[in-house]
Image (tube, rainbow, N blue to C red):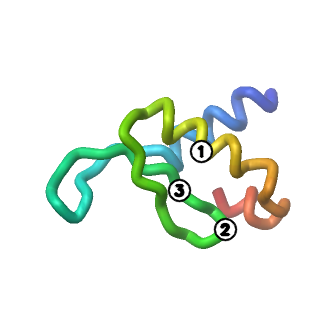
Amino acid sequence: MTKQYQIQDYINKNVFKSKNELGEVVWHAVDLRHRDTFHCDSYQEAVNIFVANWDNLTEQEKNCA
């Protein structure tokens, strides 16, 4: 499995669309360190946040993705 395929698989599992507390549809990027989510306005923003945080994770945190 190539690194690009691996990261795309993690993105598919950890970036998703749902409703926020106000009932508005937003994108979410999972914060694997704190098991929380970032609310984002677009899919691309959510992916950018997830990928930017990827390098800050420990191997154990990456394995939980």
**Which residue, given by chain and number where applicable, does mark 3 sit on?**
30
Q: Is residue 34 left or right of residue 20?
A: right
Residue 43: image location, x then y, percent: 43, 33
Q: Are marks 3 and 1 in contact (CB under 8 Å)?
A: no
The disc at residue 49 is: 1
In the picture of the structure, the residue carrying the numbered disc 2 is: 33
Amino acid carrying mark 2 in the image: Arg
Q: Secondary structure at mark 1?
A: helix
Q: Is residue 59 above or below residue 34?
A: above
- Label located before the other in sequence (3 or 1): 3
Instruction: Kindly identify the amino acid type of the residue bearing the numbered disc 1.
Output: Ile
**Of the two numbered discs 1 and 2 in the rendering, the one whose residue sits closer to the viewer:** 1
Camera-near label (3 vs 1) is: 1
Q: Residue at x 69, y 37 (%)?
A: 7
| Image side of residue 25 versus residue 38, left or right | left
Place residue 34 in its image quadrant. bottom right
Q: Residue furthest bottom?
A: 34
